[in-house]
Image (cartoon, grey):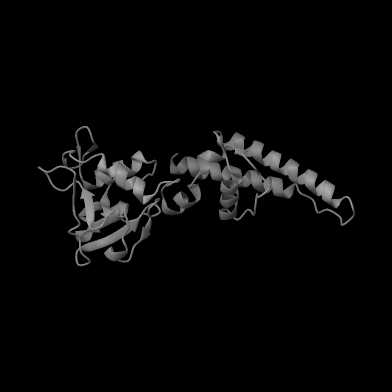
């Protein structure tokens, strides 16, 4: 799902939630409050489920994911929901909107596995097609795209995404290593190893991470570290 689509869908859901919230009236403190409150809660949950399904479409997901999304939007809790239709398409959208990506449940381990599939693909300057060849940033973009995470095309933009990691000692598998003022980018594999599309005449390779604090420009974490 693209950023534009994600924002549009969240805005639609926000509007629907606000309408539902406005439709709830305070209850009196009589003995009928529990019954009427329960009925209203069930009706609101059903209305929300229908509205969300209409706005998003797709498969069902747990109520916890919707509750987290609603909370991130400042719309309060939807803890009463269970199995809201259409919620699956929104997994990870809150984090993705903040960083300009959509990460879903992707972790650094998944990034490493996806990157290793391209070992042996030749370096081609400006390349983005693994059937022909890729350059360093084209390779990084392709790996994350395979996992449903949108990154810009060039290093100078890629190095602005995600969250910063302060040192190489704190880097985790899946983090991006940007070196020499933004001239090169690679993916950290952990245990002192990295993978990249190096230079013309070479292929995508796993290597010792020659990057040091002296030539590192940035370390960026696009998805949560690890998953195992």
Q: Residue furthest front?
A: 228
* Residue drawn at 41 percent across, 46 percent down: 106
In the rendered view of the protein, which quadrant contains the N terminus? top left
How many numbered discs? Answer: 0
Q: Quick check: 164 left or right of 184?
A: right
Q: Quadrant of residue 116?
A: top left
Query: Which residue is pictured at 79% across the width and 51% down the height?
Result: 25
- For the residue pair 223 and 125, the one nearer the viewer reads as 223
Instruction: Please tell me which residue is depicted at 46% across the width and 54% down the height of the picture.
Output: 98
Above or below: residue 17 compared with residue 72: above
x and y, in percent, of residue 5 in the image: 48, 40
**Looking at this rendering, what residue extends furthest in the right direction?**
30
Please tell me whether residue 99 is drawn above or below residue 51 in the rendered image.
Answer: below
**Residue 225 at x, y = what percent?**
38, 55
Q: Position of residue 189 (x, y in %)?
A: 27, 52
Would residue 126 be found to the left or right of residue 95 on screen?
Answer: left
- Can the viewer see residue 152? no
Give the residue at x 31% y 54%.
173
Please determine whether, in this image, residue 8 is positioned above or below residue 176: above
Answer with the quarter of the image where residue 133 lies: top left
In-image side of 27 versus 103 (left or right): right
Q: Is residue 107 visible?
A: yes
Q: Position of residue 197 (x, y in %)?
A: 19, 46
Relative to 132, is 220 on the left or the right? right
Judge by depth and name the residue closer to the eye, 11 or 63.
Answer: 63
């Amino acid at each position: 799902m693209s950023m534009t689509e994600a924002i549009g869908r969240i805005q639609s859901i926000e509007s629907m939630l606000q309408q539902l919230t406005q439709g709830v009236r305070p209850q009196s403190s009589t003995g009928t409050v529990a019954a009427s409150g329960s009925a209203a809660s069930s009706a609101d949950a059903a209305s929300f489920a229908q509205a969300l399904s209409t706005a998003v479409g797709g498969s069902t997901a747990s109520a916890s994911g919707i509750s987290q999304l609603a909370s991130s939007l400042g719309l309060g809790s939807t803890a009463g929901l269970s199995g809201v239709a259409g919620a699956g398409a929104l997994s990870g959208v809150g984090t993705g909107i903040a960083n300009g990506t959509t990460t879903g449940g992707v972790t650094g381990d998944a990034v490493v596995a996806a990157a290793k599939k391209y070992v042996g693909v030749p370096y081609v300057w400006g390349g983005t097609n693994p059937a022909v060849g890729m350059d360093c940033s084209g390779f990084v973009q392709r790996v994350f795209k395979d996992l449903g995470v949108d990154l810009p095309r060039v290093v100078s933009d890629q190095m602005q995404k995600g969250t910063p990691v302060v040192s190489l000692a704190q880097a985790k598998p899946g983090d991006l290593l940007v070196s020499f003022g933004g001239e090169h980018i690679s993916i950290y594999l952990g245990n002192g190893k990295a993978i990249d599309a190096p230079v013309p005449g070479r292929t995508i390779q796993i290597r010792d991470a020659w990057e040091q604090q002296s030539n590192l420009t940035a370390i960026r974490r696009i998805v949560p570290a690890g998953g195992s």
